[in-house]
Image (spheres, rainbow, N blue to C red):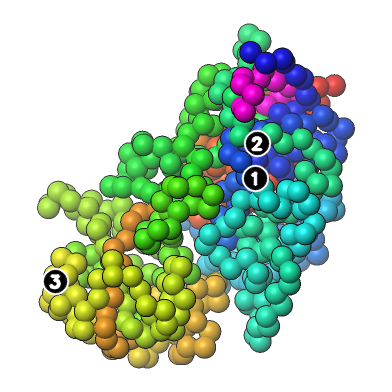
């Protein structure tokens, strides 16, 4: 066994949570070490859309968006389900404080003009002011630029601010990082470059060190063998969720689950914390989407096949999703609206009601929007079925012919008027701006399917690294046992920790929640080492 070493604070995971905690702990005078099991940093955040949602704008005028209004909006998202309102209010205050602190520390968080809340104009929602992004010059990362995890799903040269502008302009610069890569890069720069925090790559935490019931460090398995690292202030687990584990689909009660997050989220966080008696709880609602694996695509830097979520495609005109009966089952323009239908089990026929399913488009869609790695107008691979009429296409994919024809006929009739009376597709301003085609009217998310040939992509259920199960934590991100008592010296954040503040989904909340609990954990740990 290699020689031991000692630090004040150990962050397991080189993603958003681990790096945010490193920035905060360093500023509080701590000797910090970040460890990452892969050979790149940035974590799941680098694959994300990069949205950060904070209720009440801490960077401008918080008094213009009081906590009460934010809570009204979250009540709408939550519905009638119970929530710990005191814990939620604490979180909202902490998120404001953490956001302001990180912005002052150099993280270039900025409000996205014209970006409404996901469910605007719901009660308590705002037309803009709660969604933030980071734009970073990659040249400022120095040697860490080559170790920043690439994001395969978004155009990282164009910011949300430019996307949402009434007259978009191409402002590409020499290494302009936006979306999730920009968010990850901002924390990489502040932790590893500007503050010089040490980060060990290809070092996987395989065991917690315990002194009685107190966590005092961890054993790392790295390039030089195993190293015992003691942490005076504590250990933060920020190693993500479990979507990539063989049990992922079973844990989420799904017929299948392919993880679209980086191929490192396979349950390390839970396995480590359980060594110290941590409690695992069911938190937020399931959150996943649909995607398609295109031939030859792999996760960057690996040979692991990539199944690409079709987030930016589902809301485009001239498309819809159908089940084996040829019927639609939800609002395709916002992938979150499909979740409950995708989890529906047909007890009468003893099968999943809407899985398998297919993304059906006409050739105008192919020419205007492309899909996945294929640019607009580019030929699609032969693995994607296509036919000159809908009946032929239905036969190729095993869908009810009459059902598909009837569905498309009804859909087209309403789409010509920009309407979707069945599911309200394209009715949310956020969705129209983010996923629709602004140049298409009268509804940027609706267009008829009439131009042959027609194409059908069989869809897989894909996760985003966000499981419903997670470690139970308190306000300071301390990991709790099943009886509610804290595990001394152990903290968790991000997708490792169960989301207890909200059952529904708010775009950008997960990223804000990640760095907020990292901020709280580092603050609490700094008091322990004194």
Residue 41 bears which disc, if any? Answer: 1
Estimate the spatial distance between the alpha carbons at disc 1 and disc 2, rounded to whole Å.
8 Å
Q: Is mark 3 on a helix, strand or loop?
A: helix
- Is-magenta flag for residue 227? yes
Asked whether 360 or 412 is in front, the reply is 360
Q: Count neighbours of disc 3 (C-alpha within 10 A) and say few if under 14, some if 14 to 19, many if 20 or more.
A: few
Going by the picture, which residue comes out furthest to the top?
Answer: 212
Q: Name the residue under label 3.
A: 395
Residue 437 percent location from the top left of the image: 49, 82
User: Tags 1 and 2 in contact by the CB under 8 Å rule?
Assistant: yes
Q: How crowded is mark 2: few (under 14 residues within 10 Å), some or many (20 or more)?
A: some
Q: In which quarter of the image is the N terminus?
A: top right
> Which residue occupies the foreground of this view, 118 or 43?
43
Q: What element carries label 2?
A: loop
**Mark 3 or mark 1, earlier in chain:** 1
Mark 3–mark 2 Cα distance, whole angstroms, equals: 50 Å
- Which residue is painted at 61% across and 21% down in the image? 225
Q: In which quarter of the image is residue 338?
A: bottom left
* Residue beneath the point at 33% across and 70% down: 381
Is residue 79 shown left or right of residue 480?
A: left
The answer to whether residue 186 is visible is yes
Residue 23, quarter of the rendered image: top right
Dot 1: within a 10 Å radius of its alpha carbon, few (fewer than 14), some, or many (20 or more) residues?
A: many
What are the residue bounds of the magenta stretch?
222-235
291 in magenta: no
């Amino acid at each position: 066994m290699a020689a031991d070493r000692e630090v004040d604070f150990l962050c397991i995971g080189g993603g958003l949570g681990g790096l945010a905690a490193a920035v905060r702990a360093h500023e509080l005078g701590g000797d910090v070490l970040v460890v990452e099991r892969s050979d790149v940093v940035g974590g799941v955040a680098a694959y994300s859309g990069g949205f950060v949602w904070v209720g009440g704008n801490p960077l401008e005028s918080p008094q213009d968006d009081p906590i009460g209004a934010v809570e009204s909006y979250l009540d709408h998202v939550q519905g009638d389900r119970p929530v710990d309102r005191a814990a939620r209010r604490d979180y909202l205050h902490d998120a404001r404080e953490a956001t302001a602190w990180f912005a002052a520390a150099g993280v270039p968080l900025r409000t996205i003009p014209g970006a409404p809340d996901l469910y605007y104009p719901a009660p308590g929602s705002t037309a803009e002011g709660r969604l933030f992004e980071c734009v970073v010059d990659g040249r400022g990362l120095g040697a860490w630029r080559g170790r920043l995890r690439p994001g395969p799903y978004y155009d990282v040269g164009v910011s949300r601010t430019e996307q949402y502008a009434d007259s978009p302009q191409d402002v590409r610069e020499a290494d302009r990082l936006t979306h999730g890569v920009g968010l990850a890069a901002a924390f990489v720069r502040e932790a590893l470059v500007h503050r010089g925090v040490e980060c060990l790559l290809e070092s996987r935490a395989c065991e917690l060190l315990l002194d009685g019931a107190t966590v005092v460090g961890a054993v790392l398995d790295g390039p030089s063998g195993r190293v015992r690292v003691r942490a005076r202030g504590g250990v933060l687990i920020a190693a993500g969720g479990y979507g990539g584990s063989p049990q992922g689909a079973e844990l989420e009660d799904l017929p299948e689950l392919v993880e679209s997050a980086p191929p490192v989220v396979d349950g390390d966080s839970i396995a480590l914390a359980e060594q110290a008696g941590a409690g695992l709880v069911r938190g937020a609602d399931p959150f996943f989407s649909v995607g398609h694996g295109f031939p030859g695509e792999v996760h960057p830097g690996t040979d692991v096949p990539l199944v690409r979520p079709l987030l930016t495609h589902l809301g485009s005109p001239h498309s819809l999703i159908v089940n084996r009966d040829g019927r639609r089952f939800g609002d395709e323009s916002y992938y979150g609206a499909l979740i409950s239908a995708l989890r529906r089990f047909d007890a009468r026929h003893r099968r999943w009601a809407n899985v398998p399913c297919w993304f059906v488009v006409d050739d105008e869609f192919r020419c205007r929007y492309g899909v996945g790695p294929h640019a607009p107008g580019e030929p699609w691979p032969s693995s994607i079925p296509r036919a000159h009429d809908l009946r032929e296409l239905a036969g190729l994919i095993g869908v009810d012919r009459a059902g598909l024809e009837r569905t498309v006929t009804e859909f087209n009739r309403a789409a010509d008027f920009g309407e979707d009376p069945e599911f309200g597709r394209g009715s949310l301003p956020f969705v129209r701006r983010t996923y629709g085609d602004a140049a298409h009217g009268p509804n940027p998310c609706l267009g008829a399917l009439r131009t042959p040939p027609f194409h059908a992509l069989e869809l897989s259920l894909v996760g985003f690294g966000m499981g419903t199960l997670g470690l139970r934590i308190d306000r300071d991100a301390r990991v709790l046992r099943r009886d509610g008592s804290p595990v001394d010296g152990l903290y968790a954040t991000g997708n490792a920790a169960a989301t207890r503040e909200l059952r529904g989904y708010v775009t950008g909340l997960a990223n804000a929640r990640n760095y907020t609990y990292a901020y709280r954990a580092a603050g609490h740990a700094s008091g322990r080492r004194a």
